[in-house]
Amino acid sequence: MRAFRLLPVAGVVLILACSEPAGKELAKQPTAAEVLGVKLDFTPRYELINMDRPDIAGVPRLVVRVRVPRGLSREELEQNVRHALLQFYERAPVRLGAVSVGAYASERLNMGADAALGEFAPGGQWGEADPAVPLSAWQAKISFEEHYFEQRTYLAKGTRATLVLSSEFSDTISLSRKANRWLEEDILAELKPGVSVVVVGYEDFGKAGVRYEVETANKPKRKGWVHSFELKAE
């Protein structure tokens, strides 16, 4: 009889011994904010451009593009990317396997993220996306476009400038009808260095540089686009 009475007690002790570590393990799971290191009082300085859901093999993934202002320090830029990763991870209607945030400073999106790129996924690896992996195994990886931190100045509209050669392999400057292409069919004219022009406007292409729309100061009047390194302000 004595042995019979000890069996339930031993069973209870065994159950408690097995369940206690599991409970402690669950309690140790960090929040996404803790993993990403985002403080509750952080004030973001970005705005949403768009987002996509490129789910692969049934694994929910989210790709987000945001615009950030120029002039942020490296730390400020990183904290904004981490905040965006957190916000869009937590707001997703499903449990994500990975989320990516591309930060843009320019208006052009087809040139790739020109400020920073952040990925939040198991082990920090986009290819390891899996919503079943606990957050304790997730990491954020942030990479920067170094040119973002370079101070950029622009020639104002109406500035007079002189065309200069940008390469030793050409003796002319190609004037394009488009700010983003210099294909043969886009070329309006081949101008000699030393030609005087007036700045009409510009577009910032991020890591691809700045392009200026110019008009020749003398006849015959021609108007088109050149690269910033082909201009020298007078």
Image: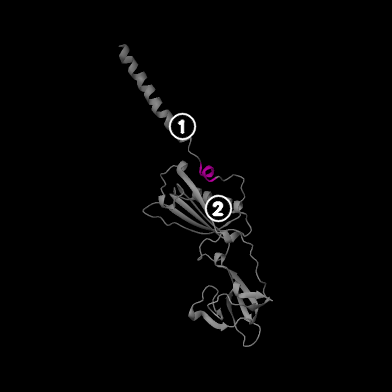
Q: Which of disc 2 and disc 1 is earlier in sequence?
A: 1
The picture places residue 32, in percent across and down from the top left corner, at 51, 44
Label 1: which secondary element:
helix
Q: Amino acid at mark 1?
A: Lys
- Specify the label residue 14 is tagged with: none
The picture places residue 204, in percent across and down from the top left corner, at 59, 68
Is 154 above or below relative to 172? above
Q: Which residue is mark 2?
A: 81
User: Which residue corresponds to the image point at 38% horizontal and 26% vertical from the top-left?
Assistant: 15
Q: Is residue 210 left or right of residue 18?
A: right
User: Which residue corresponds to the image point at 53% horizontal and 50% vertical from the top-left?
Assistant: 87
Is 24 above or below relative to 107? above
Q: Are marks 1 and 2 in contact (CB under 8 Å)?
A: no
Residue closest to the eye, 112 or 174: 174
Tag count = 2
- Specify the label residue 24 is tagged with: 1
Magenta range is 31-36
The quarter of the displayed image where residue 202 is located: bottom right
The quarter of the displayed image where residue 191 is located: bottom right
Q: Dot 2, how many residues are within 10 Å of its Cα: few (below 14), some (14-19), or many (20+)?
A: many
Residue lying farthest to the top in this orientation? 1
